[in-house]
Image (spheres, rainbow, N blue to C red):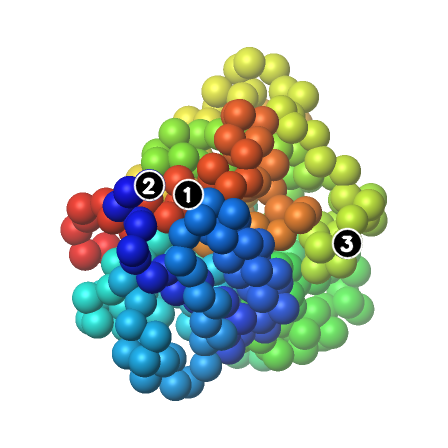
Amino acid sequence: MERFENKTIGVLMGGLSAERDISLTTGKEIHAALQRKGLNSVMIDVDRNIAMTLQKEKIDLAFIGLHGTCGEDGTIQGLLETAGIPFTGSGVLGSAIAYNKVTSKMIFNHEGIPTAPYRVLTDRDQPASPLQLPVVVKPADQGSSLGISIVKNKNEWPAALDLARRYSNEILVEQFIDGKLLAIGMNSGQPLPIVEVRPKSGFYDYESKYTVGKTEYICPADLSEGEKETCRAVAVQVTRALKGRGFPRVDVILSADGVPYVLEMNTIPGMTPTSLLPMAAKQAGMEFDELVLAILKTALLDHPFN
Ligand SMILES: Nc1ncnc2c1ncn2[C@@H]1O[C@H](COP(=O)(O)OP(=O)(O)O)[C@@H](O)[C@H]1O
Ligand SMILES: [Mg+2]
C-alpha cells in the first residue's frame, strides 16, 4: 500500500470501442474501490487525445479499465510502455495475441490446447465447409458477444455474416460446441474458483452478460474434481501460451465427453456488478476492493516487454 501513497493512479476507461459503456461501468467501480482504499486516483476517459491527456494529468501509473479495441488489444499498452508509465495487466504482445481470436486459436492448435474447429472468412461468398451446422459466426476481434450469432439453419447465414462484418473485416466461423460454459479467472498464473455461466436465453449474449437476472452463475461450478482439474490445467496452459499477466480470464466450454474447448482469454475482464472475475475472487476470499488492489500491484511487476 505504501508504494501507492503519493502516487496518482489514472483509471483509463470509456475509450473508443463498441464496449465503451461496459468500460465506463468497470472504470467507475475501480475508481470507487481505489478511493475507498484512500488512494489518489483520477478517471480518464480515453479518446484520440489520450497521449496529451496523460502528459497533462501527470499520472504515475495506469489502471487499465478499458475493454475492446484500443484498450485490450495492445495499442494503449504500447503507448504507455513508450511513455514509461507502468500499467496493470498484460503487456503489448500478450494483449494483442489474446485479443485476436484467430491468432489465439493458431497458438492453441500449436500448443495442443483444445479449441473448436474453425474457418476464417476473408471473402463474403466463401463457404464455411467442411464445418457442419450449427456454427458460431463471430468477429475475430471483439468482445461482449458483440457481432456473434449462432447459425443453426442455412438461411440464418447471410444475416450472421452481415452482423459480424459490422464489427470486423476478419470473420471467424467456429463449430458450435455443446457443453457447460465456464470462466476461469486467474491470479498471477494460478486459477481462481471456476464460475459456471447459465444464460436463461441459452446464449450468453450482450444482454445476458450485463442484465441482472438474465443469467445464473454457479461458483464454485458444480463439477467433478477431475473436471475441475482439467479446466484449471488448460487455463494455466492458455495463460502461459498467450502471455497473460495478472488477472486474465479464460473462457471454456466443457463438452459432455470432458473436453475443455477454449474460446478465448480476456486480458481485461469486466469489473461490473455482474462480472465473473470479481465473483471468482470473492469465492476465493478476495473482496472487490482487495481484487482491485491486487490488480493495481501488477503494474509494478518487473516484466519483459510482452
Ligand atoms: N464455438 C462455440 N460453441 C458454442 N457457443 C459459443 C461458441 N463460441 C462462442 N459461443 C457463445 O458465445 C459467447 C461469446 O463468445 P466468445 O468467443 O467468448 O466472444 P466474446 O469475446 O464476445 O466474449 C460465449 O460465451 C458462448 O456463450
Ligand atoms: Mg467471451
Residue at 28% across, 78% down: 55
- Dividing the picture into quarters, in which one does residue 165 lie? bottom right
**First in sequence: mark 2 vs mark 1:** 2
Q: In which quarter of the image is residue 142?
A: bottom right
The image quarter containing residue 41 is bottom left
Q: Viewer-proximal residue, 206 or 58?
A: 58
The amino acid beneath tag 1 is Leu
Mark identifier at residue 1: 2
Secondary structure category for the residue under label 2: loop
Residue at 28% x, 42% y is 2
Q: Are marks 2 and 1 in contact (CB under 8 Å)?
A: yes
Residue at disc 1, CB closer than 8 Å to ligand 2: no
Q: Position of residue 299 (x, y in %)?
A: 30, 51
> To which residue does mark 3 refer?
211
Q: Earlier in the sequence, mark 3 or mark 1?
A: 3
Using a 10 Å C-alpha cutoff, classify the residue at mark 2 as few (fewer than 14 neighbours), some (14 to 19) or many (20 or more). Answer: few
Q: Given contact means CB atoms under 8 Å apart, are the residues at marks 2 and 3 in contact?
A: no
Quadrant position of the N terminus in the picture: top left
Identify whether 87 is placed above or below 241. Answer: below
The three-letter amino acid code for the residue at tag 2 is Met
At a point 37% along the width and 48% down the height, the residue shown is: 296
User: Which marked residue is nearer to the observer: mark 3 or mark 1?
Assistant: 1
Q: Whole-percent x and y of residue 305? A: 19, 56
Q: Look at mark 1 in the image and give the residue it sits on.
A: 293
Which of discs 2 and 1 lies nearer the camera? The answer is 2
Report if residue 157 is visible in the image: yes
Q: How crowded is mark 1: few (under 14 residues within 10 Å), some or many (20 or more)?
A: some
